[in-house]
Image: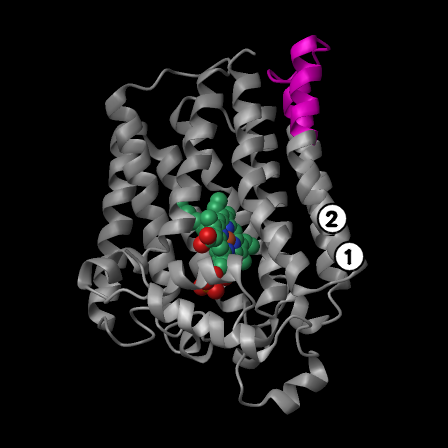
Amino acid sequence: MATDYRESSTALLDEPPVMDEENDGALDRVIPPAEDDFDGALDATESKRASRRREPTLTRDLIELTKPRIVMMILVTTVASAWIAMASPAGVSLSLLAWAVLLLGTGLVAGSAGAANQVWERVIDTLMPRTASRPLASRRMSLTLGVTMTAIAGLVGTGLLAWQFGVLPAAVGVATWALYVLVYTPMKTRTAWNTTVGAIAGALPVFMGYTAAGGQLTDLSGWMLFGVLACWQYPHFMAIAWLYRRQYAEAGFHMTTTVEPTGRSAAWQSIIGTVTLASCGVIACLAPAGQLILSPASFLTSVLVIAACWPLLKASLRFQQNPEDTRARKMLRWSLVVLPAVLLVMTLRMIGL
Ligand code: HEM
Ligand SMILES: CC(C)=CCC/C(C)=C/CC/C(C)=C/COP(=O)(O)OP(=O)(O)O
């Protein structure tokens, strides 16, 4: 199992982020110290991390190279998208083999994108405690192996998708890969608009699942799925960008919280992202086949979407009142619950609830 990504993510959700001791004076002028950052907590964080740390092995490093948690969540969105597409006018039912190929192919292409990002960022990753122990950054894995695995996973994944589902889902995968690796990754050190590009890249995989199951690129439900995914990434990432703002600033990344360190912009982006995410979900529930249907099912599922988004909106509003780590961590936790919940409600609606 992955060492750095998993550990740091768990720590991110549970504890105050570890701040670098060096350059604090200079950095404090730009980004004030976190309110709940105190020595006892940092010591506890370090010892918890040390007790969780497992010996890196080649297998664990290969998994970690793919950013496995993001891949898992991408696969959740792929399943929901394919299910929803199956219920669309042009939808086709997927066999067990087709499901397996869809998940394997998408997982390999997404894993290849995560690996390529780590190849690209192998030097800058050494500058952040969050990423410094990644296999390539720590030099446990050679660059040749990293590049080889990136290429094999990408080519096999794309080949599988093209073989089973034709050109369209495979082409969406290639386009997503290119946007994430070749556009988003270099943008991270140039402009905070990188998050918008990342949000598009993170949402595009819904069209892999959607088109693989016969959905058309012109379908409203496909675009509402895309909207849910793209908007969700604002509360999701603004929380992370706040918690890691010092590490991002020290490493030279341009994120909303490093260019606008009061947290106000991050908070508003989270609020607007959550409201728009809920709106996309509601539109999809009201018009599952493209036309407005006012029925008890439309009403019930719309209410469920709003109820599912409510805790995230509340967390974002509380963060807006007072941007601090505990509130950001709540936003992040809720983001990871809200996405599968909204996708579940949308799926139930589309398949005929
Ligand atoms: C603008 C887009 C996004 C950015 C910048 C972003 C960034 C991040 C970062 C930096 C982390 C924390 C990792 C750590 O603690 O080291 C994270 C966690 C995570 N992200 Fe995202 N992410 C984005 C979009 C997505 C998308 C599209 C998905 C999947 C659908 C996703 C799923 C996750 C998951 C599941 C976690 C794991 C939290 C955990 O480890 O428990 N993210 N993200
Ligand atoms: C099918 C396919 C190609 C899927 C790709 C999925 C994809 C593009 C996910 C993007 C999510 C994203 C922007 C993560 C943050 O990366 P980061 O580089 O900011 O994270 P880091 O700082 O942890 O490296």
Q: Are marks 2 and 1 in contact (CB under 8 Å)?
A: yes
Labels 2 and 1: the sequence-earlier one? 2
Q: Residue at x 56, y 80 (%)?
A: 39
Instruction: Determine whether 258 is above or below 22 in the image.
Output: above
The amino acid marked with disc number 1 is Gln
Q: Residue at x 59, y 56 (%)?
A: 237
The disc label shown at residue 95, or none: none
Secondary structure state at the residue bearing disc 1: helix
Residue range in magenta is 282-306
Q: Is residue 303 magenta?
A: yes
Q: Colour scheme of this structure image? A: one colour
Which quadrant holds residue 161? Answer: top left
Q: On the rendered structure, is 323 left or right of 144?
A: right
Q: Point out the residue furthest to the right here.
A: 321
The disc label shown at residue 271, or none: 2
Which quadrant holds residue 241? Answer: bottom right
Residue topped by disc 1: 320
Q: In which quarter of the image is the N terminus?
A: bottom left
Instruction: Residue 227 in the image: state x and y as whole percent.
Output: 61, 38
Q: Residue at x 65, y 91 (%)?
A: 25
Q: In front here: 267 or 8? A: 8
Instruction: Residue 149 in the image: state x and y as whole percent.
Output: 23, 58
Q: Does the magenta stretch include residue 314?
A: no
Q: Which residue is drawn at 25% across and 40% down?
A: 159
The amino acid marked with disc number 2 is Ile
Between the C-alphas of marks 2 and 1, the distance is: 8 Å
